[in-house]
Image (cartoon, rainbow, N blue to C red):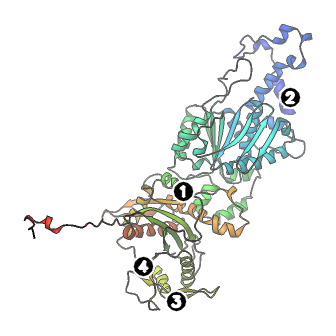
Amino acid sequence: MTSYSNFQSQNAKNTSDRYDIYNPSFNSSVEAKGLAEVDNFTKNLNKYSDFVSWARFNPDLFWDLITPETGGIRLDLDQRIFLRSIARFISTYGVFPRGYGKTLLEIMGMYHAAIFFPDIEISMTAQTRENAAKLVDEKHRELTKFYPLLKNEITKYSSSKDSVEVLFTSGGRIDVLANNQSTKGARRKRLNVEEAAQLNAALFDDVLEPVVNVPRRTIGRQALVNPEELNGSINFFTTSWYRGTDEFERNIQMVDDMANLKGKIVIGSDWQLACEFGRGETKAQLLDKKAKLSPTFFALNYESKWVGAADNALVDINKVMKLRVLPKPDIKPEKGYEYLISMDVARSSSDSNNQSSIAILKYKKGKRGQVINIKLANIYNLPNGLNFNAQTVELKRIAKIFNPKIVVVDCNGIGSAIKDEALRSTLDPLTGEELGCWDTINTDDEPEENNAPKILYALTAQGINSDIIVSFIDAIESEKLQLLDKKSNQDYDAQDKDNFNTMIMPHIQTDFLLEEVANLKLKMGQNGKYTVEQITRRVNKDRYSAVAMGLWYIKEYEDKIERERKSVDISKLFMFKKPNI
């Protein structure tokens, strides 16, 4: 109780020195009625009012006040700043690493507001309602465990797979919404946006911003709107993402608004701050991750750096994110589609980031033969260090599953070794199954077997590299390409290895594809041809290359509009009159 005792000593003033916006003279109802005629609550009304004002402005001290002597959470300095930012600013943007504990603090801020603002309605939003519900449910259980007194403030708690509702004695309510069109038309008093980096400006303006248009009114007889309350507050919390996205631009704008005292604040840290306070993984563990993981992945998830090319980017990363609409990968061919497999062959066997990638593209044609859409149905990254024979076995295993019309292989340099292996008969070393022998459709190389199916296109990018780049850009700009959506940590159990490898890993490989694309700059040579340049060489471009080559082949050889055949009366082409017979 030390915090409130300090508060009382600092605020022991004569009521004549006070000012209240609703009662400027501060005439006490207690004095008007006489002390003998009023109950204890009315006698101490001024003290309750002071306490509420103090607790609203100092959320961390309120949590200190209800912390049990044993157990509970002892808040660190950075956590106090986090909680005070939520309570004191109309909008807070927080960028924090994995393992920081931002979601728990976010929920603490929401519960604090629900306790001290009667009838307030607050929602947490995430990519899906399921994600948001799981986050709130997990953190609710932690909070009620660490702060047992919190249970006295909650009258009802209910949760399901895609919903959570928390009702408070104050009349406050907390629930969940999704960062998509299903939220349109909802009304709340405040919003906390989780996974904010995945937002796009159009969705926010159309769906989320209008949610908080109606302010909270006080529950007294006059039902006033308090001009000093943070009505319409929207807070954003996320790990970092790519430069040039809408949320990157929002960060920049909010930094300017913070400097211009517009009631907004931007806060954040990398992994070192929580580590210094002894929270999460140790410094040795995180440095070990840094040595093993892709530098871009580590920068996004642990260093809170917005990465990628802001200027001269290969494509607008916002548009790439918009294309992530496929809910699950293909593990077998889907009827009505034609399949193409494209493989980029690694140039090194020592660099852990330099691995062969295989893209599974499926496409559908219209009545006139034009390609309507292309879906990146799956993407594989082969284990580092496989020899060419083992890589060919993996390629033919995948081809046996999807039965593609064409297999495009990068045959520049050492990639020609995959072609040579593909022209031989291949046995699966694990099952003994015959994987077949292929023939090429564009070279004079002879396969080991006669009548081998002609499905291998040996691509040599010399002279067509610029066309491959243009094909990739065109697929993004025209929105013809569709990608697997992003999965959050709440969407899967990493311990379920079978499901993780088949259903979740393709989504993660798509994350890495975006990482590679964001690391590329577009350059034009003196001959007018395009090339791409990596911002950092530590991030390779194998997944990008595999996808780009497949898109080029589809555009070059499959996306052809057939001309309608019509019967023509040849006599109409001449100037003489057709004789009567």
Spatial CA span between label 1 and label 3: 38 Å
Spatial CA span between label 1 and label 2: 54 Å
Mark 3 lies on a secondary structure that is: loop
Q: Which residue is mark 1?
A: 324
Mark 1–mark 3 CB contact (< 8 Å): no
Residue reaching furthest to the front: 581
Name the kind of residue labelled 3 in the image: Ser
Residue 78 in view in this figure: no
Q: Which residue is mark 3?
A: 425
Q: Earlier in the sequence, mark 4 or mark 3?
A: 3
State the image coordinates of residue 248 (x, y, percent, origin top left): 54, 47
Q: Which residue is mark 4?
A: 458
Closer-to-camera residue (554/109): 554
Instruction: Please identify, in this view, whether the residue under mark 1 or under mark 2 is nearer the observer.
Output: 1
Instruction: Please identify, in this view, whether the residue under mark 4 or under mark 2 is nearer the observer.
Output: 4
Q: Earlier in the sequence, mark 4 or mark 1?
A: 1
Name the kind of residue labelled 1 in the image: Arg
Q: Residues within 10 Å of mark 1 (few under 14, many from 20)?
A: some
